[in-house]
Each structure stands twice: as structure tokens, then as C-alpha cells.
Amino acid sequence: MDVVSQGAEAVVFVTTSHPYCSQPAVENDKYIIKYRPSKKYRHPKIDAQITKNRTVGEVRFMNKLEKLGINSPSVISADYVNGIIWMEFIGDGLPNGDISSVKNYLWYLEKNDDDDGCVSDEVQSMLVAVGRLIGELHANDMIHGDLTSSNILLNGKEPYLIDFGLSSISSLAEDKAVDIYVLERAIESTHSVFADSYNKWLLKGYVQGNKKSKEVLARLEEVRLRGRKRSMLG
């Protein structure tokens, strides 16, 4: 197994081993393992319960996404007690070797192409598709909770959502607006030169994916205003 990423809550590995089959169906097929290690600062019983509850919640969320046909990795196996989720591998390799997250893809274009490449029809189409995917998520009252351009992978030209450790179910426009606002701020911080165009295309797709987007976008303006006030006050 090779470590893909390590955060405060979990470590993500890539492996060619299947949890049940000694030989994968496809040679050199890859899988993702997400593991929540124990936290020594918590009481063991409390830690075990938190790990189990969060793992169960994430698997349920992912299974619901799959049933709805919303692009996300399929769950292959789960060990709730030990905080392990074995899932489908999503993503391609970029020419520089990085995994094809939206962030890495846009960074690659920004570093290696001229400005026209960053605002090409292909980039616009991709970001509209991302916005549409988020719109479909919210149309089903599902909140990602940590929407960044790192948590959206490109599988070919199709965007897929990943990392549902903070996900929840909510019909509130406020929660959906905050989800979008988090993504907007992530885009502004990592792709500042082209952020206005990128975010405009994301919202264009969002409207296509969510028929009830009007209320969410109205609330988004309020969320942005609160965010600007906090920035002014420090």
C-alpha cells in the first residue's frame, strides 16, 4: 500500500489488493483504502464509538450517492469497528504525474498553458459539469461538508466527488449555500487569477443540476456577505 494523503482524521492508501479476491478482476487494478486511526487523546471507548459512527455515516452516504447515480466511488468493503473503508479507485494521472483532481488539473493548465488554455471551452465545460454534479447532490438534500477542488476528481472528463467524512443530510438552503461558499473560497485561494471565471461556470452548472437553486443562490449572497464582514473584522 502507498499513502495517497494524510489528514487530521484519516489516512488514505492506494493498493492493488482486493479485500475478497486473491486476484483482481483486472490486472494491476487499483483500490482506495481510507483508514481512521485511533486518537490517543480520546478515551478508548469514546474513540471507538466516534470512529464507528463516522465510518458508518460515510458508508451510508456513499451508498446513497451510488443508488442516486451521483458520481462518487463505490464502496467495496467496510470495517466499521476499525474505521476502514475499501472503495473503488477514481481518477487519472496528469502528464506531470499528479492525480487528476480539479485543483491539480487547473494548476497544471495555469503553469504549463497560456491564459487561453485556462479559460478554454474545455475548462468551461468541465467546471459546468462540476457545478451540475453539486447541484444534483443538493437537489437530493445531501451536503458534502468539505467541498474543495481537491475533493473533486476527474475520471476521464467526468467529475466525481470524494471524501465524505463531513457529509450530512439537510434540506436547508443555508447548508447548501455554505457548501458552495466553501468551494468558492477554495477556488479563490488556489486559482486566484481565474477564480471569477471558474466560479461563474460552477454556478452555471449548479443551476442546471438543481431546480431549486434560486433559494440557495439567494442565501449564498447572505453567506458571502457574512464572510466578507468576518474578513474585514479579522
Image (cartoon, helix red, strand yellow):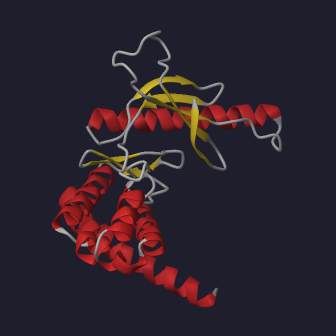
Quarter of the rendering containing residue 149: bottom left
Tell which of 177 and 14 is nearer to you.
14
Q: Position of residue 198 (x, y in %)?
A: 30, 71
Residue at figure coordinates x 27%, y 51% from the top left: 136
Q: Is residue 8 visible?
A: yes
* Outermost residue, top side: 22
Q: Position of residue 27 (x, y in %)?
A: 36, 19
Residue at figure coordinates x 76%, y 36% from the top left: 46
Q: Is residue 139 left or right of residue 97?
A: left
Residue 144 position (above or below residue 194): above
Residue 219 position (above or below residue 147): below
* Outermost residue, bottom side: 232
Quarter of the rendering containing residue 111: bottom left
Q: Position of residue 74 (x, y in %)?
A: 38, 31
Residue 200 position (above or below residue 20): below
Q: Position of residue 92 (x, y in %)?
A: 35, 43
